[in-house]
Image (cartoon, rainbow, N blue to C red):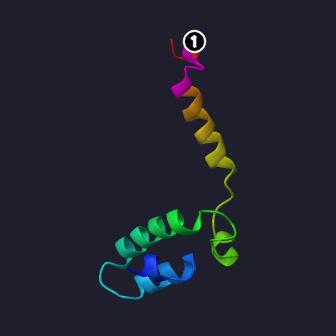
Amino acid sequence: HEAVAAADAEEAIVSAVSRGGNASALGAVAGAVAGARFGANADAIPLRWLNELEPPSDLHAVAGAVVDKRSGAGRDADQ
């Protein structure tokens, strides 16, 4: 409910986890719905939250490797 009624992603997530109970699951679901509703960009997510994340450089490399593997690039290297 919080993710649908909230004015922004922060309100949706903070409100959901503040309910208690299984806060991590509530936060994950609220975050997913809020991301779909408000977008998963720097304008939707508070900058102070983004600043706590690890730099994405390693993630970009891993994602690129997965895409290459799925698209068939590097098949010769595997054989």
Q: How many marks?
A: 1
The structure residue drawn at horizontal position 55% and vertical position 24%, both measured from the top left corner, is 71
Q: Nearer the viewer, residue 31 or 21?
A: 31
Q: Is residue 63 above or below residue 71?
A: below
Q: Nearer the viewer, residue 10 or 59?
A: 10
Q: Amino acid at mark 1?
A: Asp
Write down the region rendered in magenta: 70-75
Q: Is residue 10 left or right of residue 43?
A: left
Q: Which residue is mark 1?
A: 76
The structure residue drawn at horizontal position 56% and vertical position 83%, both measured from the top left corner, is 7
Residue 63: x and y in percent read: 59, 41
Residue 62: x and y in percent read: 59, 41
Q: Nearer the viewer, residue 57 or 43?
A: 43
Q: Is residue 53 above or below residue 60?
A: below
Q: Is residue 12 above or below residue 42?
A: below
Q: Quadrant of residue 54?
A: bottom right
Q: Nearer the viewer, residue 15 or 53?
A: 15
Q: Quadrant of residue 42?
A: bottom right
The structure residue drawn at horizontal position 65% and vertical position 76%, both measured from the top left corner, is 46
Residue 21: x and y in percent read: 29, 83
